[in-house]
Amino acid sequence: MTAPALEAIALNKRFGGLQAADNVTLAVQPGEIRGLIGPNGAGKTTLVNLVTGVYQADSGTVKLAGQDLTNLPMHEIARRGLVRSFQVTRLFGSLTVRENLHTAFLARRSPDSGDGAARLEQMLDLTSLRPLADTAAKKLSGGQRALLQMGCGFMVPGSCYVLDEPFSGINPVIKDAIIEMILTVNRTAGATFLIVSHEMAIVRRLCPTVTVMMEGRVAAHGSLEEVARLPEVIAGYLGKALE
Amino acid sequence: MYSTELVVQTLISGIMIGVLYALMALGITFIYSIMRMINWAMGEFYMIGSYLQYMLVAHLLGPDLWWLAIPISAAGVFALGLAVQWGLLKPIFKKPPELRDDYATVVTLALLLLFRSLATGIAGPNQFTPGSNLPIVMVGPMPLAGARVAAFLFALAALALFWAVLRYTWYGLALRAASQSRVGVQTAGIDVLGIDRMAFGIGVALAGLAGALLAPVFLVFPTNGMVTTVKGFEIVVIGGLGSIPGALIAGVLLGLIETFGAAFLDSSYQNIYGFLLVLVILVLRPTGLFGERGREA
């Protein structure tokens, strides 16, 4: 049996008196696009931070394709193929678009991934940022920065991606472009995604299954239609049944 | 009336000393740009560089091999910087960032006292000079001290090397990226603590290099780094904290203002002219000429 692409097992994290992650367990299968939804303060970003090494877990285990990543440093987790994006983009403002993509490639490359030049050209096309290739990232619009961040994540193929609010604060055209990028990389490279989002229309379009978090715990799991019918999800998050 | 010759000579002297000051400022600002900490012991790394240069020239290599002693001195300070980062700074940089600044301040102030006391304890409060057998160099009709010209040329070469590494190498790209976002480089798979180690080593090596180059000019004694450190911080304020071009341009600017002030106004107030410029900059542009207003975590 194939190991899940990404697995969190009984993860716990406490900040002072707040139990931000309470025995969180989830498994994302290879090639799956999983949505992670829930109200603000539910622990979604805490889970993302635990899985990607920003926070150290108090207890529990994180596995990537069966290998234990628990409490490894962030850079080591990224090198092993688990890549994340941030709600507030973390780009290198004074570096050009091309240099941002190059930086994202060099430390994560494998012996068979070459010098990255061809991949970089692909990403300039995939993100539609070729005309801005030599522009400093700080001069890009919010949407262009979001596209570049996605491109940086995709510079090394075949990884598992954890995207924290990738559609937040950007216009519909860029949202569509990011959705297409995700679907393209999922189809062509079989990449796995865990996507945090509040945008139910996009979650419905992208994610066959979702995990709902509430008050630091996993509250439900299933298709969006299934979980959206649950009274506790309606009461604690959605407010009303989805149309 | 002032002669053209005096103006040109002052200009050359100002640029030469400014470039050497800039080495020190570059070290301070480079460490800050990557690690977000001020190294208060920069002057002591300068001092150690000058002692190493003195020991190598006076006791091991001889005056003829002064040029070989300079990279060895800088390399010695670089190695010391790696050890300090690994042993004293890395442990706190592994943890969340809340108290990093305070800790780094305490550690580097403690190092300042320790290195100064060690220098006094080992070599005494005496002043040494590695000496220089370099001849006077004539630039047109103007004589310039050979040691100063050599120091200037070495500093230019070091700055060119530093720029080339940052601009054209993969490691330079990683260093530049780390100066923009520490979280971002980790997401890209880069070990930010390794970057810190190299940045601290390079930063203090620049101070050590300045110490070795200026040893024949400003002499070698336990507190000789104090004045250059003050100049370094003045330059950082003028150029903007974290700005590498700012450090270079402000270094030359400070050198020019000091030498012109000394030549044409009153040499006894030489150190005041730089402070006046700092005050003007703080009033008109508190972030410095090239300083940034904010950055990402």
Image (cartoon, coloured by chain):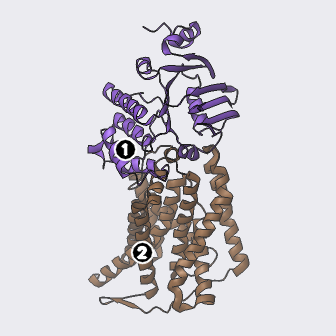
Chain colours: A purple, B brown
Question: Does dot 1 land on a helix, a strand or a loop?
Answer: helix
Which amino acid is tagged 1?
A: Lys
Quadrant into which the N terminus of chain A falls: top right
* Residue A187 against residue B260 in the figure, above or below: above
Which residue shows up at 50% across the image and 12% down it?
A238
- Residue ID for mark 1: A138
Where residue B99 appears, as percent x and y from the top left, is 64, 46
Among the 4 quarters of the image, the one containing residue A180: top left
- Residue ID for mark 2: B157
Among the 4 quarters of the image, the one containing residue B162: bottom left
Where residue B271 appears, as percent x and y from the top left, is 48, 70
* Residue A150 against residue B249 in the figure, above or below: above
Q: Residues within 10 Å of mark 2 (few under 14, many from 20)?
A: few
Quadrant into which the C terminus of chain A falls: top left
Q: Would residue A97 be seen by someone viewing this image from the given angle?
A: no
For disc 1, the chain is A
Lateral position of residue A80 relative to residue A21, left or right: left
For disc 2, the chain is B
Q: Would residue B45 be seen by someone viewing this image from the given angle?
A: yes
Where residue B91 appears, as percent x and y from the top left, is 67, 52
* Residue B10 against residue A41 in the figure, above or below: below
**The furthest residue to the right:** B121
Which amino acid is tagged 2?
A: Ala
- Whole-number angstrom distance, CA of label 1 to CA of label 2: 31 Å
